[in-house]
Image: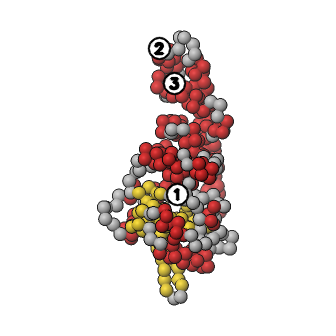
Amino acid sequence: MKEMAQSFAEISQIIENARENAYRRVNEELILMYQRVGKYLSESSNDASYGDGYVDSLAAYIQGQFPGIKGFNRRGLYRMKQFYETYAGNEKVSALLTQLSWTNHLLIMSGSKSDEEREFYMRLAIKERYSSRQLERQMDSGYYERYMLSKRKLLPEPLQSRQNPFLDSYVVEFLDLPDSFHESDFRKALVRGMRDFILELGRDFTFVGEEYPIQVGGEDYRIDLLFFHRSLRCLVAMELKVGKFKPEYVSKMDFYLEGLDRQVRKPDENPSVGLLLCASKDDEVVEYAMSRTLSPMMVAQYQLQLPDKDVLRKKLQELASLPEMEEKTDGKSGDDME
């Protein structure tokens, strides 16, 4: 019976893989078609006869030739033209274009302000396998700006040599918490909304458990949330604080990381990493508090509402205008998503 179930599962996987490959090929041809049509329209726009009348007539002709075909109305044709012109000559993203759905392309084109931002969201959507709803949420939350601002922060020494997956701020608008709440309420809400929280953290984070116990000196201690990061190959301890960051939080996290490394970490895994998630923080206080610790640890703040993207963009522009920041972040763009 067990062997039969195993064979059924294998056949099911074959079918699933074939369906996924077929969808990928169909999507690839669809995107290439839109690109070719967009190129034709772009090149035709230099002709004196080109204009709204030309596009309207073309849309009507296509509907007559291919009844019921979707996306080839006036608006859709202009989008194809925009799609071609947006990425024409951009060799860095040419291999990425067919890996995204048309809906995700439209979201990225309409919601991004620069080539760097578009490339960033393309790589992120591919890496994290975002649906259109998930991509839209990340863009609405200013993920690009938050990511780039995080890269401009001074990372703890143990994390500087790794591909750092942590942000300086996390948006958890999906928790629906009251105006006043305790840390236990915060923890339970994150566990209930773990699917959305993983979207914010990244798919490489795997949830291990809440109030994870470690025993030292005959006493039990509990870590608020414990994750495993697949790419970093390490445990990630997360402590939740409803107030402002305090220096004493660092020593407590040091204690937890030492306990995880001695009792839980496997021989082939990297040293555990800590993430302190606070309602607010002063960067100077954080820098002082962490200047002597050798543990790989990050301090981030959380937001219960979607941030103002214009404010984030302004802050990012201000930081980018500083010469030392430009030198420190040289080359950090969508390539970080690889």
Q: Is residue 48 left or right of residue 193?
A: right
Q: Answer with the quarter of the image where residue 91 lies.
A: top right
At a point 66% along the width and 39% down the height, the residue shown is 92
Percent coordinates x, y for residue 204 in the rendering: 58, 58
Viewer-proximal residue among 18 and 301:
301
Indicate which disc residue 151 carries. none
- Please indicate whether residue 321 sits to the left or right of residue 89 in the image: left
| The N terminus sits in image quarter | bottom right
Residue tagged by mark 2?
53
The residue singled out by tag 3 in the image is 77
Q: Residue at x 57, y 25 (%)?
A: 38
Disc 1 secondary structure class: loop
Q: Residues within 10 Å of mark 3 (few under 14, many from 20)?
A: many
SS class, disc 2? helix
**Which residue is painted at 59% across and 65% down in the image?**
156
Choose the circle earlier in sequence order: 1 or 3: 3
Mark 3 secondary-structure assignment: helix
Residue designated by label 1: 167
Identify which amino acid the numbered label 2 is placed on.
Gly
- Residue 191 position, x and y percent, is 44, 64
Residue type at numbered disc 3? Leu
- Mark 2 to mark 1 CA distance (whole Å): 49 Å
Looking at numbered disc 1 in the image, what kind of residue is underneath it? Leu
- Could you say where residue 277 lies in the image, as x and y percent from the top left? 46, 65
Check the image and name the residue furthest to the right.
268
